[in-house]
């Protein structure tokens, strides 16, 4: 499995806080209400759990990274956090909603994750997620492919990411029995903090699976070469603006009373 648990939670909070900042808009799709129970899949250091709880919801979070969960527990001791792999996670709880921001693209067996989410939801429960869609970071991926090929490395074979089309993902949800209420695939140019260093922070945070087996000098050279290729297209007025494309979905687990489309509610 390519999913990484080698996260540096401090670096993530310091340099990658845009991940949860952008995720705040996703909370509007969920519209959490007081007293309901919500599971955050891929909760990272817990910032969006805190956001969800502002509405009075009871929030729990899971993440594959022990470092992220440790940081989340320190920041938000009031919530229940657990280290878990969403491909195989099972719970006795029955949640009113499952939420996930910027996590599902790290999970390369999506049908298993969709089943996990389905089983964690109560009948009538809703699933709201955002993650990378088809073509996400396409220019970065192309540059990585070019530079790593010079070393005989296939970036595609090493890619830790799942960036589906909207059609492919909604079909997975429907096969599981979900009713897909809303789905959107949109460009979201994403400005990195850190000025000229923004891309190198991003490469260091998100690209380690591509660099397996390389020395730190080689990794540095790869990052420099990738940066040189991308600068004309993605460095604008002192900031790196990355070519993000996102998918957002809202889907319902049909309740026993609402099985018009024949799903296994
Ligand atoms: C993100 O979470 O922002 C992300 C992670 C991997 C690839 C692209 C984007």
Image: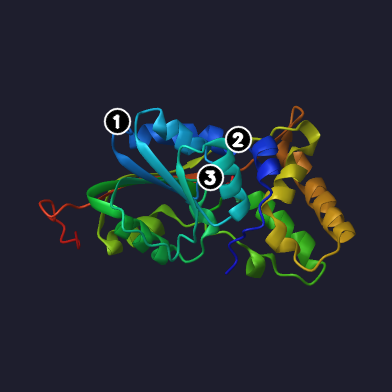
Q: Nearer the viewer, residue 228 or 98?
A: 98
Q: Which residue is mark 3?
A: 245
Residue 14 seen by the camera = yes
Colour scheme of the rendered structure: rainbow
Q: Earlier in the sequence, mark 3 or mark 1?
A: 1
Callout 2: helix, strand or loop?
helix
Q: In the shown orientation, is residue 7 left or right of residue 85? A: right
Residue most extreme to the right: 217
Instruction: Judge: label 2 CB < 8 Å from ligand 1.
Output: yes
> Which residue does the image show at 71% across and 42% down from the upper left?
11
Marks 3 and 1, Cα distance to the nearest angstrom? 32 Å
Q: Earlier in the sequence, mark 1 or mark 2?
A: 2
Graded by Cα atoms within 10 Å as few (under 14), some (14 to 19) or many (20 or more), the crowding at tag 3 reads many
Marks 3 and 2, Cα distance to the nearest angstrom? 15 Å
Q: Nearer the viewer, residue 127 or 119?
A: 119
Marks 1 and 2, Cα distance to the nearest angstrom? 27 Å
Residue 250 seen by the camera = no
> Which residue does the image show at 78% across and 41% down from the upper left?
231
Q: Which residue is mark 1?
A: 34
Mark drawn on residue 18: 2
Q: Nearer the viewer, residue 194 or 14?
A: 14
């Amino acid at each position: 499995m390519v999913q990484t648990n080698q996260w540096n939670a401090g670096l993530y909070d310091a340099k990658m806080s845009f991940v949860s900042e952008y995720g705040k808009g996703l909370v509007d799709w969920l519209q959490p209400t007081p007293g309901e129970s919500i599971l955050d899949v891929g909760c990272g250091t817990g910032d969006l759990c805190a956001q969800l709880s502002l509405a009075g919801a009871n929030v729990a979070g899971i993440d594959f990274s022990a470092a992220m969960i440790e940081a989340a527990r320190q920041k938000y001791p009031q919530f229940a956090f657990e280290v878990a792999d969403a491909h195989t996670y099972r719970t006795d709880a029955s949640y009113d909603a499952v939420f996930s921001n910027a996590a599902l693209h790290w999970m390369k067996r999506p049908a298993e994750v969709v089943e996990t989410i389905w089983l964690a939801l109560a009948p009538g429960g809703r699933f709201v997620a955002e993650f990378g869609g088809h073509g996400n970071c396409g220019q970065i991926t192309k540059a990585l492919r070019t530079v790593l090929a010079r070393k005989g490395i296939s970036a595609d074979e090493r890619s830790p990411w799942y960036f589906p089309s909207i059609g492919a993902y909604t079909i997975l949800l429907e096969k599981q029995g979900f009713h897909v209420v809303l789905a959107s695939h949109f460009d979201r140019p994403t400005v990195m903090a850190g000025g000229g260093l923004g891309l190198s922070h991003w490469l260091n945070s998100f690209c380690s699976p591509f660099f397996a087996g390389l020395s730190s000098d080689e990794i540095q050279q790869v990052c420099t070469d990738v940066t040189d290729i991308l600068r004309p297209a993605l460095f604008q007025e002192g900031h790196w603006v990355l070519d993000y494309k996102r998918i957002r979905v809202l889907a319902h687990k049909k309740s026993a009373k609402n099985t018009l489309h024949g799903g296994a509610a």
